[in-house]
Amino acid sequence: MKRLCLSAVLAASLIWGCSRETGPLEISEIRHVPVEERTTPPEVSTAARLGLDPQGASSPHHAHMTMPAELGDGFDASLLCWHPPEGWQQGPDRPMRLATFIPESTTGTECAVSVLAGEAGGVPANVNRWRAQLELVPLTTAEFDELSVWPLLGTKATFLEIEGVLTSPASGASAPVTVYGLICPLPDHTLFVKMTGPTVEMAGERDRFEAFCRSIHFRKEHSE
Amino acid sequence: MTLCKRLFAFLASYGLSVALLLLLMALVFFGTLEQTRIGLFEAQRRYFESFLVIHPLFGFFPLPLPGGYLLLGLVFVNMVCGGILTAPKRLARPGLVIAHAGVAYLIAAGFVTYHYAVTGNLPLFEGEQGSHFQSYFDWEIRITETGTGSAGRQFVIPVDAFAHVGAGGGLQVLRADQLPFDLRVSRYLVHSRPAHGGGPWSVDGVTLEELPRQQTAENNVPGVNVTLSGDSPSMGLLWGMERAPWRVVVDGHEYAINLGRREWRLPFTLRLDKFNHETHPGTGIASHFSSEMTLIEGESMRNVVIRMNEPLRHKGYTLYQASWGSSDAREGARLYSVLAVSRDPAGKWPMYASCVISLGLLLHFTQMLLRYLRRQRAQEM
């Protein structure tokens, strides 16, 4: 029996050892790339190649940031100001957005600010559209009336917190996701602040989201 | 009794069968518990695809257990030795031998699937066509010859070849006769993100920060530190979500090096002509969806429809309707369909094995029933 055990240990050691081979390896898999796909990639810095764009990103400690002027449909965005909380970095420009912020130490979390013309479908429709994205049923009128309302920009903004499931377009896999959203109807436009991320990351961002939303204000000369 | 005979007797014994089944029960129990903490993919890898696993009992006590790969290997040997080779083989009682052979066949199917099957997905927008699919979990480094006049070869290095290097640093040299340099992988991070910073792993003031592994394995974005050997060694960072490949020029030849999800080419092309979907009333949850597609092979083209639970099987590949998007698309917006693609040489073996096991058990229990009835009749007479 001793010899039997010894043989088993030896065999296990060999298997373990074989799996940790670190010598030079010959690349054996070679594919053929069609001519049209043999394009030379752009010569860019490591930072730009990996999505860190020093020109486009602002310091997280930047005290007072404004939107680029005249973004949105006829909305003079330069009249809006906000204070991003500590730990949020401004992300690169994205279509249909006035600004994007990415909290530090997160991998899939971002906060988007956008303004659309008119009512943009109305607050309830947008609340339910966001819920549908997380595979949740629409709110009833009574449930909608229970949502928090925050004073903002001289009017009332609707805040919502949604936990649901988001399906990855690439892989088809689902993951738990949380959304903090703020919808603020203005006289001719609607302001949206939407923060989305994995539920585990979003738990620590609730207070910062609220602080960011409450910091949004018009410049003093604005009289809307 | 010689050592070989004793070994064979041990491998064929009932005692070993019972011990293995108890260990498998414990493994499934602990693996299922741990899955809630470390995620499905990692639990599967650690508990069921391993030779040995150390389970943190009560969160801190290290309990060593044989892994699923080792246990199922032993069950297979035990089944063959005890259930087939040493079992009494009488034409009058074939049921149990057939059933045991079916179980061994089922385990063999698992072995073939584990080692030789590939699975991935193929996302297509309406009007778009594709002929390769990508893995959900596995990654690869690609070194592509680019520029005019290049041979257009792409050297592919699967993640398994360098994953052992780890986050702490190590070295794996990768080479090909057709390449004028060696690629040296010195650091591999399972989940990472780029950041400005210094330190021994930084390149041009950028480094890759290690992040905790995601429970959902497909959400992990790996990163590697690589160096090209040669007269003027150059260091580079590769990241799974990088915007552009790393461009290098060696001996006047241009190369693009990048890290991407593992890809496989299909022996045919699929074009998504139309995507149809319906949702449960008042929700965004799909109740029915299907993809109307054109299958293109050389000059021949034919229309196919892939629906939920009605996959397309062609040339050893199975394509399922997996999901679609975008979930918040407005009326008239362009939709995409995600097809799950699988190439499994043993894809139908579990079904065959189940038939064999069912046949064996049916024979056995029918014979038992007949024998019981005969005894009853004899007692009554």
Image (cartoon, coloured by chain):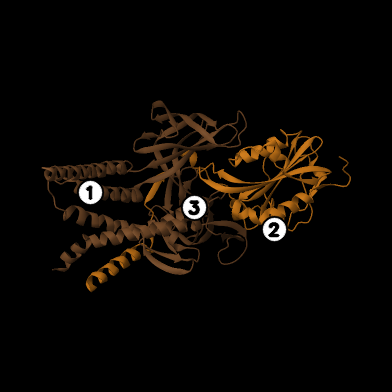
Whether B94 is drawn above or below A106: the answer is: above
Q: Amino acid at mark 2?
A: Gly
Residue B368 relative to residue B214: left or right? left
Quarter location, residue B195: bottom right
Mark in front: 2 vs 1: 1
Q: Chain of mark 1?
A: B
Q: Residue under label 1, please give it.
A: B101
Q: Nearer the viewer, residue B144 or B254?
A: B144
Q: Nearer the viewer, residue A63 or A6?
A: A6
Report the quarter where the C terminus of chain B lies.
top left
Tell me the colour chain A is drawn in: orange
**Cα distance between the residues tagged 3 and 1:** 35 Å
Q: Are marks 2 and 1 in contact (CB under 8 Å)?
A: no
Residue B308, percent across and down? 45, 34
Q: Residues within 10 Å of mark 1 (few under 14, many from 20)?
A: many
Q: Residue under label 3, please give it.
A: B217
- Say what secondary structure mark 1 lies in: helix
In this rendering, does residue A66 appear at all? yes
Q: Residues within 10 Å of mark 2 (few under 14, many from 20)?
A: some
Q: Chain of mark 2?
A: A
Q: Residue at x 29, y 50 (%)?
A: B107
Q: Are marks 3 and 2 in contact (CB under 8 Å)?
A: no
Q: Amino acid at mark 1?
A: Ala
Residue A7 relative to residue B187: left or right? left
Q: Residue under label 2, please give it.
A: A87
